[in-house]
Amino acid sequence: MKEKTILTGIRPTGNIHLGHYFGAVQTWKKLQENGLPFYLEIADVQALTDNFNQPEKVNKNVRELAIDALSCGIDPEKTTIFIQSMVPEIAELTVFYSNLVTISRLYRNPTVKAEMKQKRELFGENGESITYGFLGYPVSQAADITAFRGSLIPVGEDQLPLLEQCREIVRKFNHIYGEVLVEPEAMLSDTPRIKGLDGNEKMGKSLGNAIFLSDSEELIAKKIMGALTDTKKIKKDDQANPDVCMVFYYHKLVNLNHLETVCSECKNGLRGCVACKKELIEQMNTFLKPIREKRNYYLEHPEAIDQVLQEGTKKARAVAISVAQEIKEHMKIRYFE
Ligand code: SF4
């Protein structure tokens, strides 16, 4: 059996928050320990599909994201961290694959459909916000994966249609040009999406309900003091339901050793919400302390980040060059020796 290659990506649209950490980064940390080649792509070209008019923001976020990933324990000795735009073969493959997908198929992709709906709600019905680049991002994702012979792709349930689109492109390519590309499989994450401090199903910067790894102790305290609790609990000794409280929800992430006490004291009216929030603030800061320390180190040593990104990108590019070469040979794109 051929060795599997794991590939995942993250868009540099902002710092890593707890939703990313518990939903993805924890899984990456486990995956990098299993000895298989593991690529982590910082997808700056994809970030530009939504931020094409804010190039400085995307540029800054690439470094911020690398700092966050390394501070969380992503080890560049085990994980190849690279910048998408610095591997131009991905863009080249995107162009080749764009002939293998119809516009109507892209419109039918459930993930694309859901994101288009969101855009229309934000920017109006006239479709002005839907660019060619946005519609085609499943194609560029197929290029991301196949450029490194990615065969195992960690995804959430909502990302499955994108991977299916990639598999279709691979099958079509292999049917026309010969068996060159590897058909990737999904590695479904069993981690549920982490909710925001306000109880929203999604955590996000624009929603104002996220805790970022880069947040200061003071900011975390402020955010947690404003988190949604059981609204029926008015007085300290009122009995409450921790299952409808976001403070308890976050205790479940960072205060595992004390969880039963928090739960029973809440149910029996033996703890007040302010004290409960203060305990969570302390536990959250304890959890984030080692990450914060590493972040501070990397912020003071930007040359270390540059080195990781340059070496990772160089290593990734060498693979992509060889794969693109093989692809072009099969497509008869070779005119001179
Ligand atoms: Fe939530 Fe704690 Fe208040 Fe219970 S006591 S409602 S768990 S904040």
Image (tube, rainbow, N blue to C red):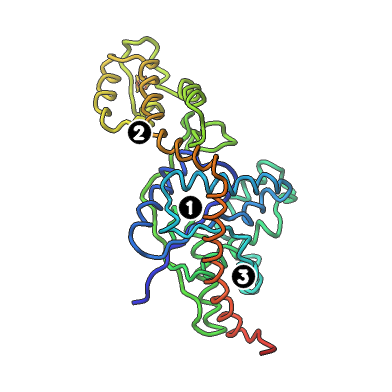
Along the line of sight, the residue nearer the viewer: 222 or 110: 222
The image quarter containing residue 289 is top left
Placement of 28 over or under 222, stated as above or below: below
Q: Foreground mark, 3 or 1?
A: 3
Q: Nearer the viewer, residue 223 or 310?
A: 310
The residue beneath circle 1 is 158
Crowding at label 3, few (<14), some or many (≥20) Cα neighbours within 10 Å? many
Image quadrant occupied by the C terminus: bottom right
Q: Mark 2 and mark 1 in contact (Cβ < 8 Å)?
A: no
Q: Nearer the viewer, mark 1 or mark 2?
A: 2
The residue sitting at 54% across, 70% down in the picture is 147
Badges 2 and 3: C-beta atoms under 8 Å apart?
A: no
Side (left or right) of 31 relative to 135: left
Q: Which mark is residue 202?
A: none
Q: Quadrant of the image for the N terminus? A: bottom left
Residue at disc 3, CB closer than 8 Å to ligand 1: no
Mark 1 neighbour density, 10 Å: few (under 14) some (14–19) many (20 or more): few
- Residue identifier under label 2: 254
Give percent across and percent down for residue 266.
Answer: 30, 20
First along the sequence among labels 3 and 1: 3
Nearer-N-terminus badge (2/3): 3
Q: Dot 2: within a 10 Å radius of its alpha carbon, few (fewer than 14), some, or many (20 or more) residues?
A: some
Residue matched to label 3: 89
Relative to residue 305, is residue 272 depicted above or below? above
Q: Position of residue 182 (x, y in %)?
A: 46, 74
User: Mark 1 and mark 2: span between their CA atoms?
Assistant: 26 Å
Estimate the spatial distance between the alpha carbons at disc 3 and disc 1, rounded to whole Å.
27 Å
* Mark before the other along the chain sequence, 1 or 2: 1
- Tell me which amino acid carries mark 3: Glu
Task: Please tell me which residue is depicted at 59% across the width and 54% down the height of the picture.
Answer: 113
